[in-house]
Structure formats: C-alpha cells, structure tokens
Image: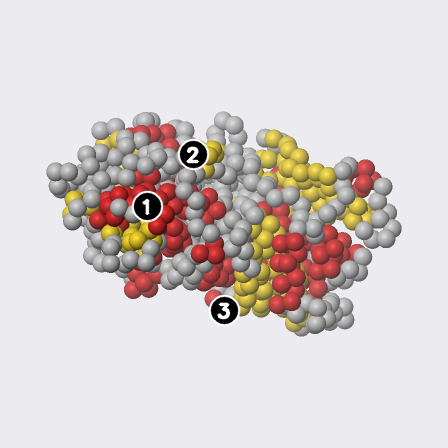
Amino acid sequence: MGTPDLTPRKQQRFTRDAFLKGGGALIVAIGVPAGVWGIARGGSDAPETWPAELDASALDSWLAIQADGTVTAFTGKTDLGQGNQTALAQIVAEELDVPFARVRMVMGDTESCVDQGSTVGSLTIALAGPQLRQAAANGRRALLALAATELDVPADKLTVADGVVSPAGDASRRVSYGELVEGQLLGVAIPVKGKARGFGLALGGAKPKAASEYTIVGQSVPRVDIPAKVTGQHFYIQDVRVPDMLHGRVIRPPGLGSQLLSYGQPSYGARVVRLKNFLGVVAEREWDAIKAARELEVKWSDWAGLPTMEELYTYVRETPSLEDAVVASTGDAATALAGAARRFDAEYTTAVQTHGSIGPSCAVADVKDGSATVWSGTQGPNVVRSAVADALDIPVEHVRIITFEASGCYGRNGSDPATVDAALMSQLVGQPVRVQWMRHDEHGWDPKGPATVHQLRGGLDESGEIVGWDHEAWIPAFFETTIIGSVLAGRTARMPSLHLWEDPILYDIPASRQLAHYQGDIGSTENDGVGLISAWIRSPVQLQLTFASESFLDELAAATSTDPVELRLKGLTDPRMIAVLQAAARAAKWQTRPSPGPDANAASGVVRGRGVATSLRGGTYNAAVAEIEIDRESGQIRVDHVVVVQDNGMTINPRALKLGIEANIVQTVSRALYEEVSFDRSNVTSLDWNDYRIIRFTEAPTVDVIAIDQPDERATGSGEPSCNPIAPAIGNAVFDAVGVRLRSLPMTPDRVKAALEEAR
C-alpha cells in the first residue's frame, strides 16, 4: 500500500455528508486507513447530509450499506493492537448475516463515529460490543422490512444468507442488502433503554440472535490487521504526513516544575515556538528539528519538589489524601481483629512504573482559522478532543480527532500529551506540525503508573479460621490526568478519570474492610500542577491491590499450614471463580505433585517453587499458577511457566483471546521482576532502556492459557484482567521456594538477597 495523500479537512476529508454514489447505493472507499478516505459526492439522488450531530439512537449513525453488499460499521472505539477491529466486525457480521469479509470498521473518528467512551478498562467488547450488536440487529430487521415490500413476502417468512434475502424455501427470488438500500439512509430509530453499564446508551429494539445460532462469533477469525503488519505495510500514526507540514520537538525542563528563564536562537533552519514554559522548535526537516532541540541554549530555574526514592513510600503514606473512602466492608473488621486469637500485619509496596512503549508517541495537528484537525494515536478520541480544545482555547466542536494505531499503550501513555504538543505548536506557527517524541520524552514525560502502599491486617480464631481482614491502601485518585504540555503552556487541559478500586474482596470473611486513601500526583502542589504525573497503566490500581491481598492471603495460609489452593477454595462462594481456580490447579497438577517447599539447608544454588493467586476484574475471573526458580546466590528470579485460566463470559475470538493473554502475562512478569522508574529530587532519571529494565526474550516464561467459555453470559473484558494474579503468584512461589516473603514490586535480585539475608 502506498502512502496516501492525507490533506486535512478539504479534498480528503472523510465526513458523513460526503458520498460516492455508485451502483445505486452508498460506497465508502476502502483503499487507505479509516479516517483519511477520499470520498466524493456523485449522483443526483445521493443523500444530502447526515445528521449534524451523531445520534446514538439513529441506526444510520452506526451502519452503512454499500452497493456491493459491504457493510461499514462506525465505532468510537479504537484498536490498540489487541484485535478490537476484528472482534467488533465479527459481532456486526453475525447479527446482519453477512460474511465477515464484507464488514469494514471506521474507528475513532470524532466526526464520523458515536462517542462510545475511551478504549480502556477492557471494556470495548463488554460495552461497545452490545451496542454494535443491537444496532446490527436493528439493521437486519429494517432491511428485512424493505425486502418484505420488495418481494411481497411477510418479513417473518424471509431468510438471509450472506447478505441476500429470499423467501424461505425459494432461493430463486432474492434481493441483496445493497440492492435494497439504493443510496438512501435507512432512517430507523433505535429504541433507547437507558444508560449502558459504564458509558453511553443501552440500545433496544430488535432481539439479537441467541448464542446457539452463532457461526461467526466464537470463531478464531484471523485478525484483519496482521497481514499488513507482517509485511510492513500497516499504516501507523508515525506514517501520517500532510502538505506543508513542519516537524516539531519539545524541549523539556530539567525539573518537573522548572520555569523558563531564557533561550537562544536555533540553527539548521529551525525556529523556536514558545508559550510561557512550553518551549520547542519546528523545522521543515525532522533531523533539523532534532539537532536544534539538542543544541539550543536554554536556561531554566531549579526545582526539587520530589521526594528521594528512599523516602517514597513514607512520603506516599504521609501525604494528605484528596479523599478517603471505604470501598467495601462486611461486619466490624476492627472489633474482629481486636478479638482475634492471632493477628498478622504486613505492608506491601509497588514502584513507579512507566508505560515504556517501544515505539515513540506521535501526532500531527493542523490548527488554523479557529479549528483543528488532529491525527492521533489516542485511545480516547473524544477525551483528547476536549483536552485539545482546552489547550487551544477553542470550542470543542471545532476540533476533530482522527485516530491511527500507535505503539501499544495498555494504558494512558504519551499519545495524548504528544497530541496536545502537536496542537499547541501548530497553533503557534499557523501550519500543520508533526511531533514525534524522543526516547527521553517517552521515558521521562509519559504519565506513570503510580507508587502505592498497602497495609494488610488479618485475624485468625483459635481454629485457624480467618475472622477479620483489613486492607488499607494509599493509591492515586485518578480524578484527572494532567497533560504536561498544557501545564507548561499555562493552559488547562486535564483528562477526566475516576476511582479504580472496583472489585470487592473475593473471599467470604465475616468481618472485612477496604479503605482507600486517594492521593494526587507525587511532588505536585495545588499551585503548580506538576510532579510525577499518574495515569492509567494496565489494570490500573488493581494489579497493585491484588499483589498485596493475594500475597497476604498466602501469609495466612502459611501461618495455619494450609494449602494455598485449599484455603482459597474454602473461602470462595462464586461458582465461576471456584471453577477457574480448580481448572488452574488441575492444569498445574497442583493436587498430584507435592510442593517442593523451601530448602532451609540450601545456602546457595537454584531452587524451585510454585505459587497461586486469583482475581476478579470487571466481571472477568482469573486464576494463575506460576512456577519459578530462584538463584540464592545472585537473587535472580526466573519465571519458567505460568498456567492462567480465564472466564470472561462469551468469547468472541478464541485465538485472539489466547494470544492476548499470553502477551499480557509476559509483560506482567516484566513489571513484577524488573520495571521501576528511578528519579532524583527534580525529575525522572531512567530515560532509556539501560536504566529502565524490561524483560528480555530469553527471560519470557512459557504460558498455558485455558479459557472457560460461557456463551450465555455477557462478554467481559480480556485486555487487562489476566495480569492481576501474576505478581502475587510469583511472590507466593518465591516463598514456596526459599521461605521468604517479598512485599515490594519489582522483585529485584537486590530485594531477594536482602530478604534472604534478613531471614538468616
């Protein structure tokens, strides 16, 4: 595929009021990626306009039928590399009774797609899937109504095969979907039942198919994006070019809160752009911008508002919280703990981590005449649209976001800040500007997975039963995510967020409490708004919460000499979680192979262990068993094998599910063993892959994935949930191997050796 001409807003602008009339039906050209298609009007009877505002209750906001029977489905969701494009197309094809190959997806264009919320929280299939399913079911019913008139046969006597309608038992009389539409909008309203769980409208109307009738959903349809990625033809955000475009680079301050004092003039044909503390250079050639940014003489004020790394967890605990909330409770935990025969206390901590996207964040913006067209790798087109509008101080309806796939973000990485960087630069110079972050931008300035602290308290009665449980956590509020470029420019642009401690304790404990101290960014103050900016990272907060709670549960199991699987099964009441844990134990041969246990006499050498953990996130059940080996002398942990079982209700694409879980496990092993942001009093110091360690190919474990399909249950997410039990399973395996408890992530060799030394 050649590089398309991506002229913004004019010749190549893809909008719902531009059509190509051909063969009597709507045609959308599919030559280049969604969001930059060239569409021309043709035919006197072509529709003049789509609705000025996209109406989620209008069928035409979701679906379009072309003359050749191809279906275009519009979704506000994006594909971050996890296969959403394929899975959502399967859902649409299934309900419309058209071949999968005839469905095209337009994704994440704010001018063409209904806002279905950001692609976060493993909620695309859970939330956008039902909306598209319902829209497609209503589309099928509307098309059958047209066919009933055309064929003079009652709609309930018609059948559909491959997008062709015919009377039952008489295939000689037939009419295709494309022939039925004849260039007209369907003009059908979809009944709205209310708000959907999490975001948007819950749609009603036609009854979707029963799962027993599915022939496309539930099949391992090959992902449509993979061939182009394998051959190098896939079009990423980094490939976008527009006419008259300049290249920009942002010049970062040495301290997060440093003030710009002075700057010189660049060479290499570059020029400076500046708005308060937002400083950068632009040039016609990218290399000129890079050199100018490196060599420009700039003076900044000093800033040292961060705690030291040694003070980090004390700082987190002692910083006043923005809000305190009891997330869940049963009984009177304080009284139960006070009266317990045996009481246990432990503190768990997790480090600051970066998203560490391998590819750099990138965006292109064209801001002129009070409006903006922006090409972005964002996972939240409508959210970043608001942030861009705030940063530029223009009405949000004057901003259009067109998404392209970027480096996998698995959380809010640098895509949105880079988008605002590009928009600010374009507004300042009056030309389109492309901003691609450098590695030091990505590691130093992307929003961080935050440090957290967890205080666990447990109480046992005389028979060893758990009678009290208390989990007190110091975690980020995620009220808003700061966009650093806007802060430096003195403009407000914060991304709205939410509290993320969702799922209550899994086990039946008579008295329990979960208490959250929601906090702001490390080092930030109410006045300057800067610091180590916290944002979503894969399974935000719950990975940390599960590490603490599932590790502490193992501590109680060890204290009572109870098998960890047995203790969990004893406390579980949810049959789906019980089934997941039992399946993991069977697959790992937990029952038939005795645990090796700690070798107290081994002063050195490699020993092995295994550990188990469970989790529930957003309705998705997981259990994992990790098998590890640990070198006592070096302190290095190696995760050899992981068994993970998942029940996410209905599975849309089994192979995509399996591969996604495998990748999730490998990344989480990296987070559990290696990843930690380093910083001094002023700024992040781990600015490259040497200083921010991630897992190597040779260190990746083998992974067995077992998916329990529940076709009659609603589909829940799979992008995040399987990562949650991994860190505690590894930590519990370390205890099984050497008898020491690791209560801090990552579990580095130094921490292992320190724990072994302390245990001697």
Which residue occupies the foreground of this view, 686 or 736? 736
Nearer the observer: mark 3 or 1; the answer is: 1
Colour scheme of the picture: secondary structure
Picture quarter containing residue 730? bottom right
Q: Who is closer to the viewer here, 473 or 567?
A: 567
Q: In the image, what residue type sits under mark 3? A: Thr
**Which residue in the structure is indicated by mark 1?**
154
Distance between mark 3 and mark 1 Cα atoms = 63 Å
Residue annotated with mark 2: 192
**What amino acid is at disc 1?**
Pro
Left or right of 513 on screen, residue 33? left
The alpha-carbon separation of the residues under discs 2 and 1 comes to: 26 Å
The structure residue drawn at horizontal position 59% and vertical position 53%, both measured from the top left corner, is: 621
Q: Is residue 736 left or right of residue 450?
A: right
Does the image show residue 393? yes
Query: Residue at position x 61%, y 44% from top?
Result: 503
Q: Position of residue 273 (x, y in %)?
A: 29, 35
The mark closer to the camera, 2 or 3, is: 2
Image position of 624 with respect to 488: above or below? below
Q: Position of residue 74 (x, y in %)?
A: 33, 44
Helix, strand or loop status at disc 2:
strand
Q: Which residue is mark 3?
A: 698
Q: Position of residue 251 (x, y in %)?
A: 35, 41
- Please state which of residues 586 and 290 is positioned toward the viewer in this rendering: 586
Q: Is 47 located above or below residue 362 in the figure? A: above
